[in-house]
Amino acid sequence: MRRLLLGAIIPVLFLVVWEAASRTGLLTLETLSRPSEIFAGGYGALRDGSLLLATLQTCETALLGLVIAAVIGVAVGTILGLMPTAERVAGPTIEALRPIPAIAFMPLSLMMFGFGVGLEASIVAYACIWPILIVTIASVRAIEGRLLEVATVLELSLWKRVTKIVLPAAFERINVGLRVAAAISLVVAVTVEIVLNPRGLGYHLVLAQQSLRVGLMWAQLFWLCLLGFVLNLMLSRVGSGSALIWRSL
Amino acid sequence: MRRLLFDPINLAASGFALSLLVAWQLLADAHVISPIFFPSPARTIEVLRYRAFDGSLWVSLASTALRMVTGWMLASAIGIAVGAAIGSSRIAGALLNPTLEFIRPLPASAVIPVAVLFLGLSNAMSLTVVAFGAVWPVLLASVHGFSSVSPQLTDVSHVLGFKRRDFIRKVALPSALPDIVAGLRVSLALALILTVVTEMQSSLPGLGWDIFFAQRSYRSADLYAGLVLLALLGFSANHLILFFERRALRWRNASTQ
């Protein structure tokens, strides 16, 4: 309780000073609006559904990109994890591609897909592939040798070996990579929308700024904060939860 | 060194990368893949060569690197200072943590519209956004580093009667340094990303803008040249810090051995 109070001091103080400063004319309304107007703007956007629609657009694209990245990342990661030589051969190429900021591919992706879901999902996928790929390689590599020996003794086919032994054994650690990627996917999706793509939360944020509806802009910014916060919370819950489910099977 | 260079695995690795490029070149020459989306590597190299000689390449590279490093240093200074405060004082932690935890998941690029409103399409805007986005890894790492100073060291400095400032400078900071350096490396990668984003968003000269402009004028070889330069910049920045990390923290490895 005491911690909660201490933690609330700064935000509450901040809001009060902000409101007071804008009422007394210390702050100009073009840039800072005031908390009461931000609440009004946010309430309006929530009621007419535009905020929820934009959130849906952003989330579905981020999810699509994440799924593409997960499929490619886990598949390639499993192959490279099982074949150390192949990993060492392809390693430098991966290391050369990895440091390119995904955002830099935006113009290229725009030429290929045009505006819309394809543009955004492809960028999200590129950004999310690397953590998934690297964690998958590491976790497949870390599987106990005895498990693989069992697979050899049972003369499992490669497909069965991967689906019955390798992936279940590596799942828990791959999950960590997926969680990192999920956090990245939202950030990248919003960034693409802010810079280029005319849909979703990022675009509406820029739109509000450019039409000087400052209250609405701040409301959307806080909404984004909240969204990221909830996502992080969910990821830490779901992450540990699904690990337990798998253990109890 | 020589043995390393001719190691069969390394040869195979360079062969793999090279064969990808050659395959690309052949496919592009045969017009199997569209030259608009995938111009042949030779054309990209040609652009790089041309721009290196007329000097425009160095200007872009330098302004992007400068923006990235300045923003990163701002972020580092703020991150280490605030992290030290939170990590070494429980009251500061209780005051600041909830607010920071709420702001942290915000996509850094989402502050661009706000920063534009305050600062216009300027270098100051770019630096603010870069610093805001890059501050989190250093901040978290430095909180962790400062809060996990070993109790023995704290006791020793109590016994020696260290003042708070001496404790931070002589004990806490060196002990937190490995964590902080790891955070600095992540921050630098983020700083590069945000530099590119702000350059695209607000037409500031640099590699990000080059790439954007190349696309708008459908010069895809220029676009790839920009991507290659960005990869080089990111790669060398990362390895520079790794190199520094190994040298600066040598005392630590020596003491544990």
Image (spheres, rainbow, N blue to C red):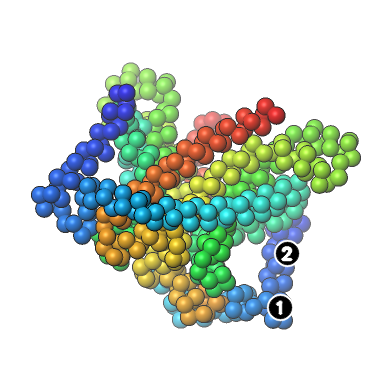
Three-letter code for the amino acid on which mark 1 is drawn: Val
Residue at x 68%, y 46% (from the top left corner)? A137
For residue A75, side relative to residue B57 (left or right): right
As drawn, B144 above or below A221: above
Q: Is residue A36 left or right of residue A231?
A: left
Q: Position of residue A61 (x, y in %)?
A: 53, 56
Residue nearest the observer in this picture, A224 or A133: A224
In the rendered image, the vertical position of residue B237 relative to residue B206, given as above or below = above
Residue name at image x 71 percent, y 78 percent: B32
Answer few, some or many: residues within 10 Å of disc 1's Cα (few below 14, many 20 plus, some between 14 and 19): few
Report the number of numbered marks. Answer: 2
Which three-letter amino acid code belongs to the residue tagged 2?
A: Gly
**Residue at 35 percent of width and 51 percent of height:** A47
Where does residue B179 sit, x and y in percent of width and height? 46, 38
Whichever of labels 1 and 2 marks the residue nearer the N terminus, that label is 2
Q: Nearer the viewer, residue A153 or A16?
A: A16
Q: In the rendered view, does A134 fall on the left or right side of A162?
A: left
Quadrant of residue B41 within the rendered picture: bottom right
Quarter holding the C terminus of chain B is top right
Pinpoint residue A118: horizontal percent, then vertical percent.
Answer: 56, 64
Query: In the rendered image of this protein, does residue A191 appear above or below residue B154?
Result: below
In this picture, is A102 found above or below A180?
A: below
Query: Which chain is indicated by disc 2?
Result: B
Circle 1 sits on which residue?
B32
Q: Which mark is residue B15?
A: 2
Q: Which quadrant: the N terminus of chain B?
A: bottom right
Depth check, front residue: A103 or B7? A103
